[in-house]
Image (cartoon, rainbow, N blue to C red):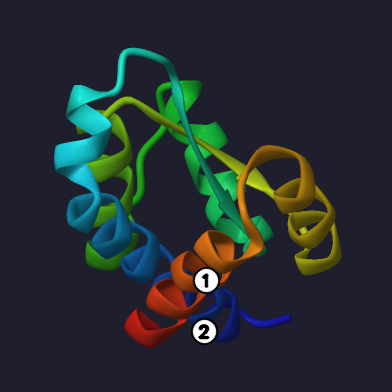
Amino acid sequence: MGLVSCRNICSSPALGIAAAVKHFSPFIIQFHHPVSVLTDSKPCVQAYNKLCRGEFSSRARVATFLATASRFQVSIYVILLDQLTSLSQVAMPLNVVVQIVKYVHSLT
């Protein structure tokens, strides 16, 4: 995969995650437990892991995503859609998960 296509893989999902975290920030701020963001974008998780190691990105969209994740102290994890469906049966009602997924997809 070339450098240009690799940048496009992470930029749009990164911006979408940042927008979703900002949208839900009032709830994140008031929540007294660690907050996890689940995404299907492995490049975004890799960028987040680099941030945790002290590295950063010079790309504006990715830098916005990393700054937002850092500001609200959220953790970013990769999860596939079928895992999300099975997780929702245990953790929260499926309609809540569907609403969140639809919102995030509308941003990207």
Give the image location of residue 86, x and y in percent.
84, 54
**Above or below, 61 relative to 72:** below
Crowd rating for badge 2 (residues with CA inside 10 Å; few <14, some 14–19, many 20+) = few
- Give the SS element for disc 1: helix
Q: Quadrant of residue 59?
A: bottom left
Instruction: Decide: is 73 above or below 81.
Output: above
The number of discs equals 2
In the displayed structure image, the side of residue 57 where residue 10 appears, left or right? right
Q: Residue at x 61, y 46 (%)?
A: 92
Q: Quadrant of residue 69?
A: top left
Q: Where residue 39 appears, x then y in whole percent?
A: 59, 57
Q: In the depicted view, which residue is nearer to us: 92 or 63?
A: 92
Where is 93 relative to 66, above or below? below
- In the image, what residue occupies the spot 49% across and 74% down? 7
Labelled disc at residue 4: 2
Q: CA distance from mark 1 to mark 2?
A: 27 Å
Q: Please indicate whether residue 66 sits to the left or right of residue 68 in the image.
A: right
Per the rendering, the mark at residue 64 is none
Q: Is residue 32 left or right of residue 49?
A: left
Residue at figure coordinates x 52%, y 71% from the top left: 101
Mark 2, secondary structure of its residue: helix
Where does the image place residue 66, in percent across and percent down from the top left? 32, 44
51 or 40, which lies in front? 40
Q: Quadrant of the N terminus?
A: bottom right
Comes first in the chain, label 1 or label 2: 2
Mark 1, residue position? 101
